[in-house]
Amino acid sequence: MKRSASDADRPPAQRPLQIPAIPVFNLPAIQPPPPPPAPLPPTMATVQRPPIAAWPQPHPAFFTFSANQAYPPGTRGLPATPVPASHNMRLVNGPPSGNSSSTARPGSSGRYTRNQVAEQTQLTVKLATPADLSELADTLRQQTKVSKIIIATRDPQELKATFDAIRTSLSVLDIEVDFQGPMPERSVLNSVFSCLHERQAPIKSFQWISTRSNSKPHQIDQFVFEALLRSQLLEKIHFLVPRGDHAVSVNINNPGHLTLCVAKHQSLRSLSLKGIEGSAFIDAILQGIAHSAVIEDMHFNQTNLASNTTALQVSVSNNKQLRSISIKDCRLESGSMSQMLKCMQGHPALESLDFRTAKIPTEELLLIGEPIAELLVTNSQIKTLHCQCALSPTNITSLTVGLTANTHLTSLRMDAMQDTTSYPAQITQTDTSKNLENMFKANKGLREIVIGLTASQNGTDKQLLKAIAKMPSIESLTIENILKIQLVSDVLPDIAHIKHLKLKMRAIGSTNRDAFTQTMHQIADNLSHHKNLLNFSLILDPRGDQYDMLMGWFGDLNRAILKIHDVTTHNRLRMKNLQAAIGMSVMQDLQRDEPRALPTLPVEMNQMLFDAAMDNLSFEDAQRVYEAISPFTHPPANQ
């Protein structure tokens, strides 16, 4: 870099760098980062689970420790109470603003005037007065951006009035009902849906979610579903009713008419029912699916399908448009799942199958590996398989063949169960152990595995984890039902390629908590060498650990989570090395006329310098470096 003539006789001024490890550019003035927060005591506020971008939300009863969130990270370690997610619709509790009050009806809150919702795509209707709903109806008769309406209520009459307000909407809507009261009686529910039956409502998708369990038996008339199906714009129905102590059944007086409504519907593509039973109703729905030319998704949950075996098989065999089939927590007749798997062989559209939590007789699970393997061999379309399987020698041999042959399967979730009838005391001494270790070895396509361990004492879990660790294609690994955390620590050196790791423990117990915390520190130390890990989550079972957690008897478990947090954050930054290198080159170019500034370096060299910095800087300094560079990166790369 050339110096001016006036500076020729003077020694260059010493300019201290804020981060001496990277003498590549002059960082702008940055306030020093605040000191890291002290570890939070494990109170009820601190054990609530935060949102984790890479993982589905676990059951709210579980305690979740997250070692990372979306960058830039928030408070590390034990998560604080999460900030509620923002909603597009701003609920106005006080007097309406001047802009909306000018067009608001007398007696209304002004929440639903056209000015108020002009730029909104989602509205939440809650505690709405008749004037509010009249105002909403007037707004929806005009052109707006609103495409989804969430109705939160516990009053059937308020729900009916809201249905009546939205059924004349100019735009086609996604409707979600969050019903917070007890399930209405049949006659009341019929009255609620009558306004939809009288006229085709502009509904694209309909979701009913009851948040209150049933304290007594309830029934729904088929009229409710026929009222929804009357809209030929409808593409998706999702009816979720929690069982509680009693199931909700559907009263059928004309099954043939209901079957015809489903079969002849012109746009219905997805049908999902949870907590609703009734043999005649399920049969009518399944027969309608079997003859439908458009339905692609068939999902049942918490449903007794034991008496609907024939209709279930016919629907799978006849409907060649089915892409996704799910029967979670459904009771099945012995042999019906194996027969249904045979019906899916060569299915031209099936991509996703989930029977992981289905209630299947144990004797069938001992031999179910063969039909699963035949499905994997013959069906090249399937990409996601959620299943359960006993680790019997026959099943292991069959699954090895199926997983070797299938190259399209990308996601496998399997609840492994121990075969107590065949296994000796130590599986590691048998030929079965070798077969188990090689079960996943030849598969080249799997990217995600969720494995539920057997929690056995005979070595099955260790061999299963060793088998998974041998798969170089795996990016996401979830291990559930962990009895001994040491098993995970033992296989960490073999899974350095894993990007997303989630551990879900069984009850630890007071006698093992110190050893558990110590092992978690070993895991944290081992993970410090993994440069690919981007996400880590630890979930503890509250049934045995809740009291210990609240009393702070897990010692410095939080410190181990903080260590892993630093690892994942460094790795996330390291993945942005190309964007950072571009930003560094831009900064160097902007500072090229400053004294002692380095010339603009090639992007490749800056990329190497950034990688070296990430390996040698502390968490706080690494974060400051990237925050200084990020404004100069290209916008698409910085998002």
Image: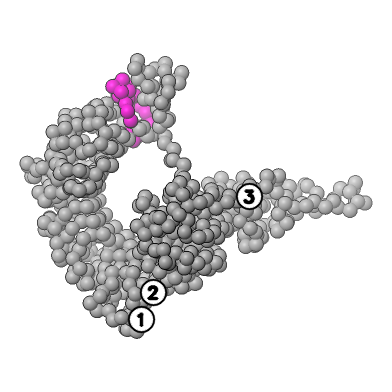
Asked if one can make out residue 292 in the rendered structure from this viewpoint, the answer is no
Real-space Cα separation, disc 2 to disc 1, in angstroms: 9 Å
Determine whether 434 is above or below 307 in the image.
Answer: below
Label 3: which residue? 35
> Which of the marked residues, 1 or 3, is nearer the chain's N terminus?
3
Determine whether 337 is above or below 54 in the image.
Answer: below
| Callouts 2 and 1 close, C-beta under 8 Å | yes
| Callouts 1 and 3 close, C-beta under 8 Å | no
Instruction: Residue at 15% x, 55% y: name it.
Output: 305
Q: For residue 433, which quarter of the picture?
A: bottom left
Instruction: Residue at 65% x, 54% y: name it.
Output: 621
Type of amino acid under label 1? Thr
Type of amino acid under label 3? Pro
Q: Give the range drawn in magenta.
A: 126-149
> Which of the marked residues, 2 or 3, is nearer the chain's N terminus?
3
Q: Position of residue 223 (x, y in %)?
A: 13, 37
Type of amino acid under label 2? Lys
Q: Does the magenta stretch include residue 167?
A: no
Tag of residue 428: 1
Which label lies toward us, 2 or 3? 3
Q: Which of 524 and 113 is in front in this view?
A: 524
Determine whether 36 is above or below 212 in the image.
Answer: below
Instruction: Residue at 70% x, 49% y: name it.
Output: 27
Q: Which of 632 and 497 is in front in this view?
A: 497
Mark 2 is surrounded, within 10 Å at the Cα level, by few (under 14), some (14 to 19) or many (20 or more) other residues, namely: many
Tag of residue 462: 2
In this picture, residue 134 sits left or right of residue 342: right
Q: Where is residue 596 in the image (x, y as percent from the top left)?
A: 80, 52
